[in-house]
Image: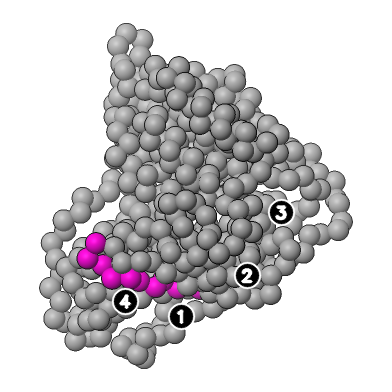
Amino acid sequence: MQGLDRRRFLKTTSAALAAASVHIVPRHVLGGAGQTPPSEQLNIAGIGVGGQGAGDLRDMASENIVALCDVDWKKAAGTIKTYPKAQKFKDYRVMFDKIAKEIDAVMIATPDHMHAPIAVAAMHAGKHVYVEKPMAHSIEECRVMAKLAKETGLVTQMGNNGHAGEGLRQTKEWIDAGAIGHVKSIHCWSDRPGTFWKQDLDRPTDTPPVPLDLDWNLFLGAAPDRPYNPVYHPRAWRGWFDFGTGALGDMAVHNMDPAFYALDLGAPSAAEAKTSPLKKESYPAWQIITYEFPAKANRPPVKLTWYDGGKMPPLPPEVASTFKLADNGIYFVGDKGIMVCGGWSGVPFLFPAKRRDEFQIPPKTIPRSIGHRQEWIAACKENRPDMAKAGFAYSGPFTEALLVGNLSTRLQQRIEWDSANMRATNTSEADALIRKTYRKGFSIWV
């Protein structure tokens, strides 16, 4: 069934886009009599507005929030109160059916497993898309979303605040200027999971009643059916295979971003994980994943190691003994020194002190951002996808590379990755994780 759906998708996408092409440019961009000019507000629908989505909408409050959609109206009560004029929905499909013509763009902040189904539906409806990190739940979803964004010309953005920050730009400018010479290895880490959600869990056996305000069927969405339990919702879904992508989807998106951006890492050739014992349905308590990236242009091969769940990289001998690594961050090891950056693409700091003293800080050559969500809004208004710097053209390959690490964790073996053919060359067991199946009514396939 999934293979048939994919073939149908490929055959029908071009026709669907052609039929929708007159609607892809929102009416506010066109202007004219009775139309809103580009300088004024976008009509935004928020989907998943009880947690991170509430903060996203606060940053979009300069625009017209026309609709709010959430499977749990109790969790979303504060956001609903903030935007009393917005129409209220539980099912994004019903929202699109009823008021699609009133919407220019959508903000998606659901659990990971629903990012792609909603984003694909929105793009097919001709809507610009802002989707929280990680961009997708599976590698195939990354490919489909990036392809559709390119074909429609819609403005897309993955929620990754640090990508708009000063630290990300400084890191690239300094590495390009030879601050630490040729980069030999990279270490990146996060204190999560454990501090914000639990992992290393077995499925609960008790089946408490579903809260009155929660539509459990819609929460499950694309995921296989299972009874409700508060161990999944609210907020606790991230550590479960069916709903989340673990710490890589939550924090590697932030903390590894400087490496992918500064070094144009692209796809890994391999990933190998060491973890605590793995349960059947949830991510491990901790993991250490080593990615191998082949040489590219003038850059030699690079190894990048990820640590989470309380595991930390060793402190390099070049770093002062009094320096303590923060709970989240990244450091680059070069043949001329070490560059340490804070979490969320924080500003860089050089070691040893001698290298810090002799390095001449280069001029700022990369344009600075007006703000992560603000650049998405401006890009939507000007109909210029290139203005949103974490759009799917960048975030798709980035997210895909991260998820190769999850393949190694879940299969408990090294993954030899063939990006061109989207397959693990050393195991066919990865296929079921690279490409998902979907519950009826929630597929990404037309």
Tell us which disc is closer to us: 1 or 2. Answer: 2
User: Which of the two discs, 1 and 2, labels the residue nearer the N terminus?
Assistant: 1
Tell us which disc is closer to us: 3 or 2. Answer: 2
Q: Is residue 302 magenta?
A: yes
Q: Position of residue 347 (x, y in %)?
A: 30, 67
Q: Which residues are magenta?
A: 297-308
Mark 3 packing: few (<14 Cα in 10 Å), some, or many (20+)? some
Which one is nearer the viewer's eye here, 113 or 264? Answer: 264
Left or right: 151 in relation to 308: left
Q: Position of residue 145 (x, y in %)?
A: 47, 40
Q: Amino acid at mark 3?
A: Tyr
Q: Amino acid at mark 1?
A: Pro
> Does dot 1 land on a helix, a strand or a loop?
loop
User: Which of the two discs, 1 and 4, labels the residue nearer the N terminus?
Assistant: 4
* Circles 1, 2 touching at the beta carbon (< 8 Å): no
Left or right: 227 in relation to 77: right
Q: Which mark is residue 232?
A: 3
| C-alpha distance separating marks 1 and 4 | 15 Å
Left or right: 268 in relation to 90: left
